[in-house]
Amino acid sequence: MKVPVKLTVFAASTAAVFALAFGVGSAFDPIVDSRTVGLAAADDPADGGHSGMDMGSDTGEEPPGGSAVGAPTPGGAPAPAGPEVPGLAVSERGYALRLDDPSPGVGDAVEVAFTIESPDGGPVLNYRPTHEKELHLIVVRRDFTGFQHLHPERDETGTWSVPVNLTEAGVYRVFADFAPASLTETLTLGADVFVPGEFDPAELPAPSTEWSDDGYEVTLSGTPGAGVESEVAFTVTRDGSPVSDLEPYLGAFGHLVSLRSGDLAYLHTHPVDEATAGQRGGPDIRFGTTFPTAGRYRLYLNFAHGGSVRTAEFTVDVPATASVPTADAPSAPTTSSAPSASTEPEAAGGGHSGH
């Protein structure tokens, strides 16, 4: 046989052998590009994949309160995903938070405008009031500073707007808490606002159960635990004396916002006692809430006294399970506090800054 013919036959035989080996090997131990699989899984709902939230799988970091979702447990099985919590998504149930400008500028009264988009693509025009307002806007920098609780005004086109204190550079999270008239539940949508400038992030204060500012002291007690209904209580004093003439604020004697460290997940809390106009209460303010996971949380308590709304801030470490409180003296959670820098007088329009 001539040399060219021999080479051709040899090449064809070699290719056939490699093809057969690859096919057999793939059947028992497939060769897969993990990067391609990861992207495909993230985009394929049938495989349980999801996009839009990084749980730390690429960086090795753990999400708040535990190991990465889906990471192997000591027994070898994947860890169950944690419960869904509000505030992590810009859209839900077909409703979306649309900021007019995610970089609105720098200043102590920067107008932030946005629209709540309905499932049909138009602006939501009908709301069901919750806590006496159609919509609550919570603004906080991602290092948990600069907290503000605001009540925007809505025009006839469905656009909401409100002046926001954005004097410090950084990335701020804005939460729109509202209930469309067509739904029976409340939605909380979140988006980021960017403020240019030199960013000097603050460290989250260490746990403590005391907060004080301008003669006021607030003590936090309770037994929070992950995944169970918990009651937390705040006791307000001024110059050492109990404050028993707290004023109604949003239908109660206080309003509580809880944010999870790491992703700023937003927790819904419910005041135990309601309040009506002219009624006075205190010194205790109680709330019921469920912390979805163990880990660290930042709590912001708004309360009204002397015509001003004040904000007491605490850091809480939530254990995996709640301890059992005594009937007479509930044990205090592991918490921390930092004084609020300012107060805001009650305004006729109902818009209040919590900081």
Image (cartoon, helix red, strand yellow):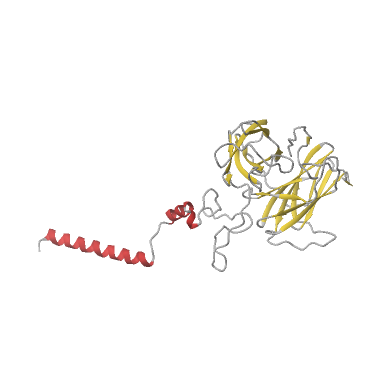
Q: What is the quadrant of the C terminus in the image?
A: top right
Q: Residue at x 77, y 63 (%)?
A: 324
The answer to which image quadrant residue 334 occupies is bottom right
Q: Residue at x 20, y 61 (%)?
A: 12
**Residue 203 left/right relative to 42:** right
- The image shows residue 220 at horizontal and vertical percentages of 79, 52
Viewer-side residue, 147 vs 86:
86
- The image shows residue 233 at horizontal and vertical percentages of 79, 52
The answer to which image quadrant residue 301 occupies is top right
**Residue 237 left/right relative to 5:** right
Q: Residue furthest right?
A: 241
269 in relation to 24, above or below = above
Q: What is the quadrant of the N terminus in the image?
A: bottom left
Q: Residue furthest front?
A: 182
- The image shows residue 322 at horizontal and vertical percentages of 73, 61
Q: Residue at x 72, y 48 (%)?
A: 299
Is residue 355 visible to us here? no
342 in relation to 233, above or below = above
- The image shows residue 283 at horizontal and vertical percentages of 85, 48
Count of numbered marks? 0
Is residue 304 visible to us here? yes
